[in-house]
Image (cartoon, grey):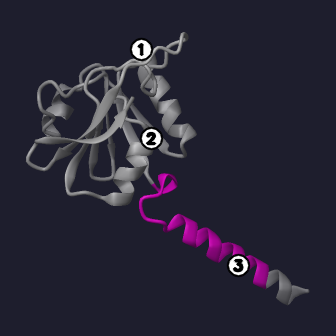
Amino acid sequence: MVLGTRRVFFAVAAGLLLVACQPGSAAAATVTVYKDPSCGCCSGWVEHLKAAGFTTAIVETTDRTALQSRLKLSPGMGSCHTAQVEQYLIEGHVPASDIQRLLKERPDARGLVVPGMPLGSPGMEMPNGARQPYDVLLVKVDGTTTVFSHHP
């Protein structure tokens, strides 16, 4: 009976190790979110990330200007919260599925942005279901952007 228990223990331990070592998995990634303490849509976006399996660390701040400057966020690309996951910048209401894809594909880029605050994006859901189409932009190393995904 002891031998069987050891096999189960080692099988479970090996399985947990494999899951923990999966590159780019949401469970392995902590998203650090810099947000205004009174912003409800930012809190909604954080809840969206948690529901998708991300661990979050919240930094309450009323001034993200220095952080956005350090991350070289281009003018006009800003939103109401800034985040970092691994080496990537995440600005605005980027869906968790796009962050997961970013971490899986690992492009040579600065990160993802959703400029503004599009209705219906994560954290910006409307009670009446109103939505507006928006693009998630990939910010390349040189600061230029391309469409990473489109959300109708």
Mark 1 or 2, which is nearer the eye? 2
Residue span colored magenta: 7-28
Please tell me whether the stretch drawn in magenta is mainly helix, strand or loop: helix
Residue 36 position (above or below residue 50): above
Residue 113 x, y percent position in the rendering? 27, 35
Residue 28 x, y percent position in the rendering? 47, 56
Instruction: Decide which of tag 2 and tag 3 comes sooner along the chain.
Output: 3
- Tell me the CA gap for discs 2 and 3: 31 Å
Which dot marks residue 96?
2
Instruction: Decide which of tag 3 and tag 1 comes sooner along the chain.
Output: 3
Side of 126 where 133 appears, left or right: left
Side of 18 where 89 appears, left or right: left
Residue 4 x, y percent position in the rendering? 84, 85
Q: Are marks 1 and 2 in contact (CB under 8 Å)?
A: no
Q: Name the residue tied to disc 1.
A: 38
Residue 48 x, y percent position in the rendering? 51, 33
Q: Name the residue tied to disc 3.
A: 11
User: Could you tell me which secondary element the residue under label 1 belongs to?
Assistant: loop
Dot 3 crowding, Cα within 10 Å, few <14, some 14–19, many 20+: few
Instruction: Decide which of tag 1 and tag 2 comes sooner along the chain.
Output: 1
Q: Could you tell me the amino acid type at mark 2?
A: Ala
Q: Residue at x 63, y 77 (%)?
A: 14
User: Could you tell me which secondary element the residue under label 3 belongs to?
Assistant: helix
Mark 3 or 1, which is nearer the eye? 3
Dot 2 crowding, Cα within 10 Å, few <14, some 14–19, many 20+: many
Dot 1 crowding, Cα within 10 Å, few <14, some 14–19, many 20+: few
Q: Residue at x 29, y 30 (%)?
A: 114
